[in-house]
Amino acid sequence: MPTYVPKKETVEHHWLLVDAEGQTLGRLSTFVATRLMGKHRPTWSPAVDTGDFVVVVNAEKVKLTGRKLDRKIYRWHTGYPGGLRQITAGKLLKQKPTRVLELAIHGMLPKNRLGKKVRHKLKVYSGPEHPHQAQQPQRVKISA
């Protein structure tokens, strides 16, 4: 019996709705990254996008355990001399609440062309509202 390899035309992508309120950042990120890549399906293939679209709401209410709000630092460089910038997780969560979750999830995705394609299937919103009602996303409960 030959090995089944899914074709990109035959893969069915679903829309999932995840509520981040009260969820731990790392556990939520691994759940979402798994669904985006499609590793929860028996038809997963590393070369084919078999994942689902994921809509995350209430990103501002995600939890960070321990002292990560003060000690976790996000660093980036502007490309100019002396352009090293940094911000703590607590400040970033107040300024751009969606960015903390996006960075955590993007770090768990593959760093190739397929990973960039998968990133576009993630939709993160800071409040409970989202503009994707037409896609009828299915609400998913994450066990804590």
Image (cartoon, rainbow, N blue to C red):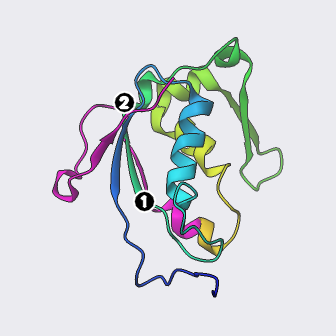
Mark 1: few/some/many CA within 10 Å (<14, 14-19, 20+): many
Query: How many numbered dots are placed on residues in this image?
Result: 2
Magenta stretch? 116-144
Q: Earlier in the sequence, mark 1 or mark 2?
A: 1
Tag 1 residue: 52
* Depth check, front residue: 85 or 81: 85
Q: Position of residue 52 (x, y in %)?
A: 42, 59
Figure quadrant of the N terminus: bottom right
**Residue that extends furthest to the front in the rendered view of this protein:** 1
Task: In the rendered view, tell whether residue 85 sits above or below residue 118.
Answer: above
Q: Quadrant of residue 126?
A: top left
> 6 or 62: which is nearer to us?
6
In magenta stretch: residue 139: yes
User: Which label is found at residue 27?
Assistant: none
- Amino acid at the residue labelled 2: Asn
Seen as rendered, the residue at the extreme bottom is 2
Task: Residue 137 in the image: state x and y as whole percent.
Answer: 26, 50
Helix, strand or loop at mark 1 = loop
Residue underneath mark 2: 58
Horizontal side of residue 41 vs 110, given as left or right: left
Above or below for 28 versus 46: above
Name the one closer to the observer, 63 or 47. 47
**Residue plotted at (64% across, 16% down):** 65
Residue drawn where x is 54% and y is 63% of the image: 42
Q: Amino acid at mark 1?
A: Asp
